[in-house]
Amino acid sequence: MGASSLLAMARRCAIRHIDTLYDVGSTHPYSFWRPILLKVDDPAQLRTLEENCPQLRGETGEIWQRFIQRDIPRWETKQRAPANEINWWKLYRKLKAEADREKDAQEEALKETMKKLKEAKRKNTTTIVEAKTITNSIHHRRFGGAAGPKAPPSAKNAKTALDKLKRSMYDSRQGQPKAAMLPNKLLEERKGRVAQAPKSMVEERRRIQLGAPRTKTWTSQPTPNTAAKASTIATGHTTEQAAAEQAAKEARLRALTAGGASAPLKKRKRAEVDPFMKPVKRTKP
């Protein structure tokens, strides 16, 4: 393979620096410069070359068609060729202006649609407001403060407000009695159980076992006469009981001194233990 010609090397150099090419002179025709001009990607640069080199006018239609196919949407439905081959750049400018207007209209319609969607989303969004803020604002207005407009809560604080709400619900549940926290099944099972007998029932059971007479509670204060009678009855009862005990002791002592066999004492039967009674402490005689 032989060495490249000087013309081929010059064309390769011009293609490498195509962005800086704005004039090719007026000596050679378009067919000579065509391999280089096909690498031009900027319509403004091609128009400058046509203005500086009159021999290129009316010959660059294929390059302008490539620009139209690249930059104009739905170019197949547009005007495909100008009446005069010299006016290819005018056709491109016209179609490009129409495409830009259509693009701007579509962008404006898209903005309106997005705006409506955001407005609908804002109306359907639940805003979480802390109760403390509401209370402070009501208190401020009640005492003569001016209620000015306030900024809506930031969306970044939504998670924080939700966490605070969950924490307050947990704390309120912890403050409730344990019975309220039990499942319904356990509550139903515990309805028929009695953990402790009523105090009145325990007292009644104790009186029955001890054989004590049933006492009656008076709500009114005793008069001096009734108080004196009660003290007299109590004193007489105590005296009779003491006399009976003294007589029993003397009889037992006489039997022992006489040397006679005394009748065996009747053994007392221990009272049955009742689970409803509290233990009675025994006092030594």
Image: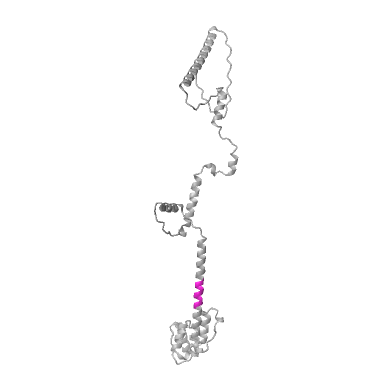
Q: Is residue 225 above or below residue 188?
A: above
Residue closest to the far top: 258
In this figure, what is the number of numbered marks?
0
Residue closest to the far bottom: 27
Give the side of residue 133 with respect to residue 251, left or right: left
The question of residue 108 being in magenta is answered with yes
Residue name at image x 58 percent, y 41 percent: 187
Residue 135 screen position, x and y as percent: 44, 51
The question of residue 212 being in magenta is answered with no
Residue stretch rendered in magenta on the structure: 100-109
Residue 79 screen position, x and y as percent: 54, 84
Residue name at image x 49 percent, y 47 percent: 172
Residue 114 screen position, x and y as percent: 51, 68
Residue name at image x 53 percent, y 42 percent: 178
Q: Is residue 234 above or below residue 3?
A: above
Residue 239 screen position, x and y as percent: 49, 15
- Between 75 and 125, the residue placed more toward the observer is 125
For residue 206, which quarter of the picture? top right
- Between 96 and 143, the residue placed more toward the observer is 143
Q: Is residue 268 above or below residue 196?
A: above
Q: How is the image coloured?
A: one colour
Which secondary structure dominates the residues rendered in magenta? helix
